[in-house]
Image (tube, rainbow, N blue to C red):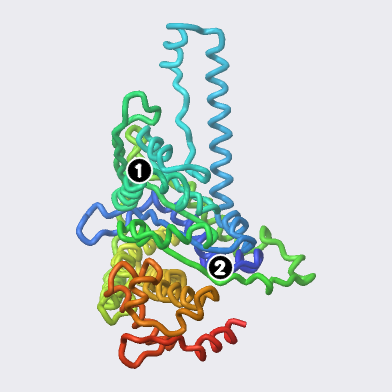
Amino acid sequence: MRDATRAIAEHVQAPLALAAQCVIGAAVYLAQTRVNAPHIHNADGMPSSIFLLTLADSGDRKSECRRLAFKKIDEAEARARTNHREACAEVTTMAGGLKGKQLERFMAEHPLPADPRTQYSDATFEPIAGAFIRGMPAATWDTDEGGQVLGGASLKADTRAATLGGLVKAFDTGSFERTRSQGNMEGSGFAYNRRLSLHLLAQAVTVADALADPLLRGQGFLPRFLFASPTSIAGTRFLTAEQLGRKAYADPRLQRYWARCEAIAATTQAIDHETGEVKPPVLPLTPEAEQDWLEFYNEAEGEQSPLGKFTNLRPFAGRAGEIARRLAAVFACLEGQTEIDDECMTRAAAIVRYSLSEWRRYTDSAVPDPMLQQAAALMAWLRDPKRTDDWQKFHRDKLGKSGPPATRKSAKERDRLLAVLVAHHHLLTTDGKQFTVNTVAETAETAESQ
């Protein structure tokens, strides 16, 4: 997987983390119907399914990275759909001319084969859940337009809380449940022991609101994602004649990776074809792997303390141990191992640690302190040329009566905003009542901006 990641990043000229997430996404697809990850308390384990989210700008070559990583999976899916279409056409042709009870009897004796679809790109949660309830064992929601998933109809409708709950339940236990009216084509029902993985590639601007949404963060949906937001390398992707002569399809690193994908795909999936349930064996941890996991778990737990680096990411850090177990199981599956050794666990922990650092970096840069935002808005209001003369010097009571809405709601809120501006030297005061706009700070800010 590491060699394939490097090969994809080199040939496509894309960020290494982007290529890595795509390779992990493909590995998860293959592993989720073949192995279960070990659970701390449940002997049956837990799904090895993983949710992945990668942010990359337009033109950063998300689609090409995904295409090379999923090449053998996509080819197998295309063959399965072609065979299904031909089989359905054969039954339909045989039934040609039959009507009424004769047609009903024929179709009962020759039912159409089940839809082999396992990949969804342009979809919403409802039809995917419906497919699981009708018997689909496993699938991946896989798209390079992740903004349509996180910011689309599924999570903007009135039922988004229910959708989030359904996705969380799918991740945790692989179960789906819906109650609908009899006339609803998707119907009602239950489905247990299914597998759903998400592999989302998105532009940051299309998911910014979703990633800052308290519901998506607090309900535990986003904390279940393995996350990467690599810096774009656009502007450095120069080509040489030698590079043009190298082809991805001839690269032995990718050929080995694709051969391994085909070998795994050829093995039996742990699917009960009568019920659609997926019940694979649990890959146990070796004693060394368990010790490595314990150290990582305690590390992530300790960093959630008030002085820890993940104190503002507690829901995310709280999931780190579970995701590391799932990822280690995926690695072991790709290696053809019957247990999770310390190397698989160490590497899985390193990647989950990286994901946490990415969540932290993204959160710190993309979600400014609301109080600072409000204080900046107040300073912009005070510096507006229309009111500069009237507000060069002012009393706090005047601001409470004639200032912007945020300062008129409560004296406490007004004073907090003033204190922030004084602390950052945008306002000057000697008594906490009379204030003066600091023109030196304004000039320095303007010069820095220019």
Q: In which image quadrant can residue 93 be found?
A: top right
In the figure, 206 relative to 410: above or below? above
**The C terminus, quarter of image:** bottom right
Whichever of labels 2 and 1 marks the residue nearer the N terminus, that label is: 2
In the figure, 240 relative to 114: above or below? below
The three-letter amino acid code for the residue at tag 1 is Thr
Residue 345: percent from the left, percent from the top?
36, 69
**CB-based contact (under 8 Å), mark 2 and mark 1:** no
Helix, strand or loop at label 2? It is helix
Instruction: Give the residue displayed 55% in from the left and 60% down from the top.
Output: 203
Residue 152 falls left or right of residue 37: right
Residue 267: percent from the left, percent from the top?
45, 47
Q: Which mark is residue 159?
A: 1
Residue occupying the far right of the picture: 241
Residue occupying the far left of the picture: 41
Seen from the viewer's position, the closer of residues 168 and 37 is 168
Residue 371: percent from the left, percent from the top?
37, 74
Instruction: Give the residue displayed 45% in from the left and 44% down from the top.
Output: 153
Instruction: Give the residue displayed 58% in from the left and 40% down from the top.
Output: 78
Residue occupying the far front of the picture: 390
Helix, strand or loop at label 1? It is loop
Instruction: Give the residue displayed 38% in from the left and 66% down from the top.
Output: 405
Q: State the separation of the CA atoms marked 2 and 1.
A: 43 Å
- The crowding category of the residue bearing disc 2, from other C-alpha atoms within 10 Å (few below 14, some 14 to 19, many at least 20), is some
Residue bearing the label numbered 2? 3
Residue 20 falls left or right of residue 197: right
